Image (spheres, rainbow, N blue to C red):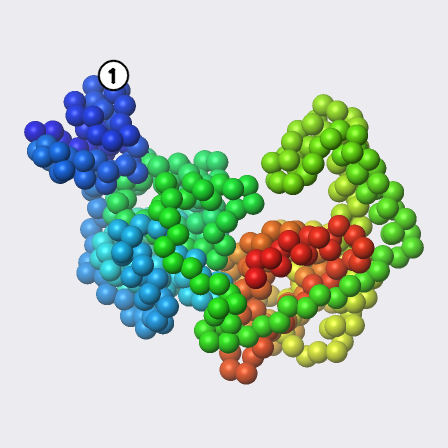
Amino acid sequence: MITLRYYKGTILSGNVRVPHSTWDSALGSYKALGMYYRDAITYLKESGIPFVDKVMDPVPCPNLTADVIPRGYQVDALYSWEDAGRRGVVVLPTGAGKTHVGILAIQEVNAPAIVVVPTIDLMDQWRRRLHSAFSVDVGAYGGGEDTIGPLTVATYDSAYLRAEELGNRFPLIIFDEVHHLPSPGYSQIAELFASPFRLGLTATYEREDGLHSELPRLVGGKVYERKVTEMAGDHLAPFKVQRVYVDLTGQEEEEYRRSISTFREYLAKSGLRLRTQKDFQRLVIMSGRDPEAREALLSRNRAMEIALNSSNKVEALRKILSTTNEKAIVFTQHNQLVYRLSKEFLIPAITHETPKDERFEILKGFREGKYRVIVTSKVLDEGIDVPDASLGIILSGTGSKREFIQRLGRLLRKVEEKEARLIEIVSRSTAEANTSRRRRAAL
């Protein structure tokens, strides 16, 4: 009879070769990554090989019954995950209650669970939600916190650092914003944890670099998906997406044409075609050793900076804000424009540089009506609970479908008689028009 043991993110199976294992002469045992624990159990049972399972050492845990009332589609998502063997990814729009699906999964498994999140803000939000739902102490790893509980929330960074230590303590692992998981380094969290039950949550499954193809291996495939257009009007606020075009000023257009011509001439000369993110990365690498490639890349960046930050965009924004009393969030790509707008329009700004306490006070003031408009860069794109706003204005952004869906999601929490509007302000006859078309394809 063999004994299965956990050792620093791996499963030891003695002299029996289980799936995905290799011989480790130093340990005198076959060894597989922790993520293959369930495969090892299945193999041994089906092969009739007697074994003792000493892999999991779960955190002591009370009976977990949640005080929540789920919506029908959240129950459907849970059933789909159950049918897939309690593995897989649930894709729901921002504001549709992905956290509720995680809570339902915890209740269903009724065992210790760890939730992995990308930010401290999300860690705090999950802790509050879990404590409210289950009335248990919730542990945390991240932001100076270092406590374990039957339910624990950890940032991706902390989970990565503690994976070997924590990998056999939780039968269920939930990855919030699971599109982060395939990133270099973070994928090791899934590989080292032995958790047999795995749930991924996201509003945007696909990654621009294609690494979402790793998710079936790490956490399971996509088991349930609802698109924002399917849910608008019923479970989310109805919405409209509008595009407002502005012209570059004479000086801006002259500089834009000169810069974009330099960039395009290099592409034609080099034969390089930028069809994917990998192609663009190739140009970045080339710029490190080729002065012409570097000049082309700088020219491209300068052209985009002109298009994204055109002065006529600011005037279009002024006109929009002067004709409505709606609560509004203004999104930009760069902090420099955030601070410029904050100063010019006398509105609060939130960037990654904004201290946590100050950000809390700004969002509180926005919620209570003290502020009608706030301006932000990417910091509100993901994960932070934003008070109800009905108007979003994209002054500048990337072609990322994920960024677009997340910005739209900031507006879609359903409130009676609310219709959300997302307005893109786009520089006419520039590459930004193509950028807008790419991101709108997410709908």
Q: Secondary structure at mark 1?
A: loop
Q: Residue at x 35, y 47 (%)?
A: 220
Residue ranking furthest to the bottom: 417
User: Residue 440, how many percent across, how many down?
Assistant: 62, 59
Q: Nearer the viewer, residue 406 or 441?
A: 441
Position of residue 334 measured from the top left corner of the image (x, y, whole percent)? 69, 51
Side of 116 where 438 appears, left or right: right
Work out whether residue 272 or residue 26 is closer to the camera in this orientation and state it.
272
Left or right position of 425 against 53 = right
Q: Furthest residue to the top?
A: 25
Residue shown at the point (54%, 83%) measured from the top left: 417
Q: Position of residue 269 (x, y in %)?
A: 79, 30
| Image quadrant containing the C terminus | bottom right
Closer-to-camera residue (72/409): 72
* Up-down relation of residue 375 to residue 421 (above or below): above
Looking at the rendering, which quadrant does residue 165 occupy? Answer: top left
Name the kind of residue labelled 1 in the image.
Answer: Ser
Q: Quadrant of residue 282?
A: top right
Q: In this picture, is 160 found above or below 335?
A: above
Residue 349 in view in this figure = no
Residue at 76%, 47% in the rendered image? 304
Q: Quadrant of residue 395?
A: bottom right
The residue carrying pointer 1 sits among few (fewer than 14), some (14 to 19) or many (20 or more) residues within 10 Å by Cα, namely: few
Total marks placed? 1
Residue under label 1, please give it: 25
Residue that appears at 87% across and 52% down: 252
Is there any visible trace of residue 28 in the rendered image?
yes
Q: Is residue 147 left or right of residue 55?
A: right
x, y percent for residue 212: 47, 44
Q: Where the N terminus falls, by quadrant?
A: top left
Given residues 427 and 101, the one toward you in this image is 427
